[in-house]
Image: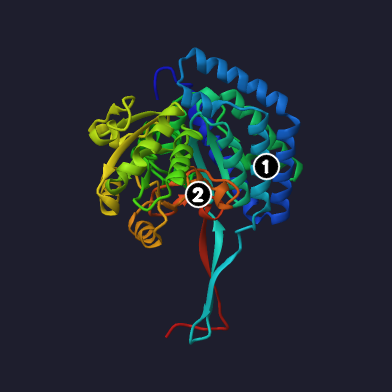
């Protein structure tokens, strides 16, 4: 603990853990109707308390601007009426999902008469550490509640007032449905030592940690956590323009993938162009991005498309910009694109634009990323767009969850075995 840390922080964190374990036991037995009632009440509370939430967010934004936060972080932090309504609808979308708990995943009978079922159960208590985005408070709380997990949320100091206001709505929903308020807890301090406690001092309480933030946060969580981690390190996402792509579609997809929201992990960071279509596709696509205010950093061939293109360095191919910058490179067809993504990518989200179905299928099968798309923007890398209601993040792990982490990905399973007096010989 640092010299400036709250001397009572350890007891605060232990209390959060104890209360979460007790709440998880209650929540694991809660019916789908009760959980859905809590979610519905929480969504209504967000709408009813929109003024208070936006006022709190105004305090956070003012402090963030004074601290010199960049445009991408400010965009992640900012709330408005439209985003609040989307937050409420996101909770309702989670509410409308089927309850995964108790679902029979598989069942079979053995020759000796034993009847075996694999049944979904909650993970238990989840710790979520996140930065900037106050909507994570609502999304994470809703997903954990629906999947029967208690959760301890530790948001960033830059969104403290917003998180408190949103958390109050979640608590109102829980209490209104007769569930413990401790099902969804918010760490009540901005002391950075709280993160350290969650990572290594709460193994008796936390079953899994989910980081949601920048590269340095996720790297720290992976290095220090003493419980399993679900998360991604970064989103270095690619769009590959194939020789058989429709040029207008290529322009639209590249523009949307990069510029719709530059600060999300599904934003495209690298544009790859098939050498066979340089003469027809490169200049229109590159100029569309430039004209939209995107800085393009290209190899020598891409630089010839427009004098506004800046030279790309080796580091650019690895970079997750999270702002209006994209690296662009000409590659030798599908094989070149796959090789580039394999070397520089982060296994997050990649897209191919092509009218050649065979080429598309080879890309989809051979690119080993969590999400692979054909003729669609990488900005669809989002649980809500997959029909999952919402998601805590996009996992690039191969174990325990991969891709959007939604309700089902926040569950485990157990085996239920029914016999009629069998004993083992």
Q: From this viewpoint, is residue 196 visible?
A: no
At which x and y percent is residue 348? 39, 46
Which quadrant: the C terminus?
bottom left
Q: Nearer the viewer, residue 37 or 304?
A: 304
Determine contact: label 1, label 2, CB under 8 Å.
Answer: no
Residue 3, compared with residue 287, is above or below; it is: above
| Horizontal arrangement in the rendering, residue 166 relative to residue 380 (left or right) | right
Q: Nearer the viewer, residue 32 or 200?
A: 32
Nearest to viewer (mark 1 / mark 2): 1
- How far apart marks 1 and 2 lie (CA) works out to 18 Å
Residue 325, compared with residue 179, is above or below; it is: above
At which x and y percent is residue 50? 71, 28
Which quadrant: the N terminus?
top left
Residue tagged by mark 1?
89
Residue tagged by mark 2?
405
Q: Nearer the viewer, residue 287 or 173?
A: 287
SS for dot 1:
helix
| Horizontal arrangement in the rendering, residue 12 relative to residue 363 (left or right) | right
- Place residue 4 in its image quadrant: top left
At which x and y percent is residue 134? 57, 31
Q: Residue at x 67, y 50 (%)?
A: 95
């Amino acid at each position: 603990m640092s010299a400036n840390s709250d001397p009572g922080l350890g007891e605060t964190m232990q209390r959060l853990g104890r209360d979460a374990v007790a709440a998880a036991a209650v929540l694991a037995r809660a019916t789908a109707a009760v959980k859905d009632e809590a979610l519905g009440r929480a969504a209504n509370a967000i709408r009813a308390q929109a003024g208070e939430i936006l006022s709190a967010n105004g305090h956070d934004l003012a402090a963030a601007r004074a601290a010199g936060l960049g445009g991408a972080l400010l965009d992640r932090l900012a709330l408005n009426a439209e985003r609040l309504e989307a937050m409420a609808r996101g909770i309702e979308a989670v509410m409308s999902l089927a309850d995964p708990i108790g679902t029979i995943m598989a069942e079979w009978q053995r020759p000796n008469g034993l009847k075996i079922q694999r049944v979904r159960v909650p993970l238990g208590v989840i710790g979520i550490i996140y930065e900037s985005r106050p909507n994570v408070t609502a999304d994470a709380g809703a997903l954990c509640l629906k999947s029967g997990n208690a959760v301890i949320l530790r948001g960033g100091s830059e969104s403290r007032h917003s998180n408190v206001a949103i958390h109050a709505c979640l608590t109102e929903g829980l209490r209104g449905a007769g569930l413990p308020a401790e099902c969804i807890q918010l760490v009540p301090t901005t002391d950075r030592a709280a993160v350290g406690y969650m990572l290594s001092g709460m193994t008796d309480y936390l079953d899994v940690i989910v980081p949601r933030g920048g590269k340095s946060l996720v790297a720290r969580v992976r290095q220090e956590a003493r419980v399993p981690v679900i998360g991604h390190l970064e989103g270095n996402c690619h769009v590959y323009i194939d020789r058989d792509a429709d040029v207008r579609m290529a322009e639209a997809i590249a523009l949307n993938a990069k510029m719709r929201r530059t600060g999300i992990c599904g934003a495209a960071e690298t544009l790859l162009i098939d050498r066979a279509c340089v003469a027809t596709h490169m200049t229109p696509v590159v100029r569309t991005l430039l004209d939209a205010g995107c800085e393009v950093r290209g190899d020598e061939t891409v630089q010839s498309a427009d004098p506004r293109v800046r030279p790309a360095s080796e580091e650019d191919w690895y970079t997750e910009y999270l702002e209006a910058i994209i690296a662009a490179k000409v590659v030798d067809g599908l094989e070149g694109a796959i090789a580039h993504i394999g070397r520089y990518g982060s296994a997050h989200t990649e897209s191919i634009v092509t009218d050649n179905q065979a080429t598309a299928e080879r890309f989809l099968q051979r690119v080993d990323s969590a999400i692979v798309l054909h003729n669609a923007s990488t900005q669809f890398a989002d649980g809500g767009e997959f029909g999952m209601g919402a998601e805590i993040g996009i996992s690039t792990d191969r174990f325990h969850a991969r891709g959007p982490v939604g309700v089902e990905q926040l569950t485990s399973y157990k085996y239920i075995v029914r016999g009629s007096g069998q004993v083992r010989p």
